[in-house]
Amino acid sequence: MFASSVALNNGNGSFTLAPLPVEAQLAPIRAVLADDFDGDGRTGLLVAGNDWGFPPVLGRADASYGLLLRGTGDGRFSGVDPEQSGVVIDGQVRHMAWLRRADGSRVIVVARNNDKLQVLRPRSARP
């Protein structure tokens, strides 16, 4: 079975492959940003993607509007409801990165295929 997954470093030169939650399986993931988004001390993931390059008979793979995944601390992740996270990323996402602004706050810049950049302002943007 194919599934979007994360490779967890076991610290001894080996990795464990762990599938992401079902909410992350709705469309191809093309960009991932890892950080402690909610300040709980655990690494979470912001994932986004979509792909419109399939033949018409197959249709688009565009069911994702981005997803914040909260780290559980044991190598697993749980999806955060978009209403709670505020994440809405439309289009074919290809890259995401943190950008530090002149005032020291950080924003997430999202690069989308054949589209404008999208800027996300985290609710708790840490300097």
Image: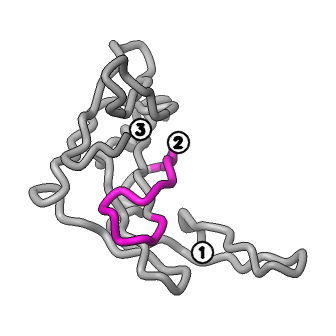
Residue topped by disc 1: 1
- Depth check, mark 3 against mark 2: the one in front is 2
Earlier along the polypeptide chain: callout 2 or callout 1? 1
Q: Residues within 10 Å of mark 2 (few under 14, many from 20)?
A: some
State how far apart marks 3 and 2 are (Cα): 22 Å
Element under disc 1 = loop
Residues tagged 2 and 1 counted as in contact (Cβ below 8 A): no
Element under disc 3 = loop
Is 50 drawn above or below residue 118 in the view shown?
below
User: Which residue type does callout 2 highlight?
Assistant: Arg
User: Which residue type does callout 3 highlight?
Assistant: Val
* Residue depicted at x 37% and y 40%: 127
State how far apart marks 1 and 3 are (Cα): 22 Å
Q: Position of residue 11 (x, y in %)?
A: 81, 78
Element under disc 2 = strand
Q: Is residue 80 left or right of residue 51?
A: left
Q: Position of residue 1 (x, y in %)?
A: 60, 75
* Residue depicted at x 36% and y 28%: 104
* Residue depicted at x 32% and y 32%: 105
User: Closer to the camera, 110 or 54?
Assistant: 110
Query: Can I make out residue 55 in this image?
Result: no
Residue topped by disc 2: 30
Residue topped by disc 3: 57
State how far apart marks 2 and 1 are (Cα): 19 Å
